Amino acid sequence: MEFKMKEVGFHTTTEYGELHVAGDEAYGYRPYQLMVASIAVCSGGVLRKILAKKRMQIEDMTISTNVERNEAKANRIEKIHIHYTIKGKELNHNKIEQSIKLASKNCPMAQSVKDSIVIEETFELA
């Protein structure tokens, strides 16, 4: 990827379209938002595939995140809490719990930061 400087922030063009990144939300996505989104959506995508392989029919999934940052250390991300709200038919609580653990081990984004960011995952059935 190549990022070009703008008056405020940077932008890049991908196959999907343009991505604007800046420290100020008025000019683009903030870097921490992209990192959290990458981890949450990657984890959710892997979870979705695992549940499909287990023949669990998911009708809808919402992913909510809470982020803890450390202002004393460059405002780095210390912890991300990912909460899945899953809707479907005949969902098995234990299988979903096992699948979330498996998804965490197979999500490239989560694995990339596992030694520096605590990732906590919970879920509820809708």
Image (cartoon, rainbow, N blue to C red):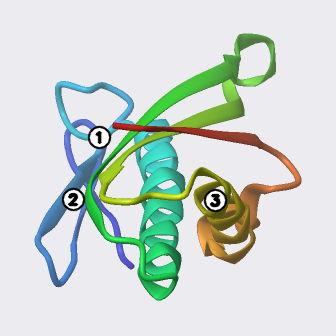
Examine the rendered structure and indicate whether residue 86 appears above or below residue 2. Answer: above
- Residue 114 picture quarter: bottom right
Amino acid at dot 2? Leu
Could you give the CA–CA distance between mark 1 and mark 2, rounded to whole angstroms?
A: 8 Å
Q: Amino acid at mark 3?
A: Ile
Callout in the foreground (3, 1): 3
Q: Which residue is mark 2?
A: 19
Q: Is residue 55 left or right of residue 50?
A: left
- Is 56 on the left or on the right of 112, as rendered? left
87 lies above or below 80: below
Q: Quadrant of residue 68?
A: top right
Identify the element where label 2 is drawn: strand
Q: Nearest the camera: 117 or 32?
A: 117
Nearer to us in this view, 76 or 99: 99
Q: Say which label, 3 or 2, has the lower sequence index.
A: 2
Ranked by sequence position, the earlier of labels 3 and 1 is 1
In this view, the residue in front, 47 or 35, is 47
Which residue is depicted at the point 21% across and 59% down?
A: 19
Name the residue carrying label 3: 100
Q: State the image coordinates of residue 58 (x, y, percent, origin top left).
A: 31, 64
Tag of residue 78: none
Q: Where is residue 105? Give x, y as percent.
A: 75, 71
Q: Residues within 10 Å of mark 3 (few under 14, many from 20)?
A: many
**Whole-number angstrom distance, CA of label 3 to CA of label 2:** 29 Å
Three-letter amino acid code at the position of disc 1: Tyr
Left or right of residue 50: residue 49: left
Helix, strand or loop at label 1? It is loop
- Taking depth in this image into account, of 99 and 114 the one nearest to the observer is 99
- Residues at marks 3 and 1, CA–CA distance in whole angstroms: 27 Å
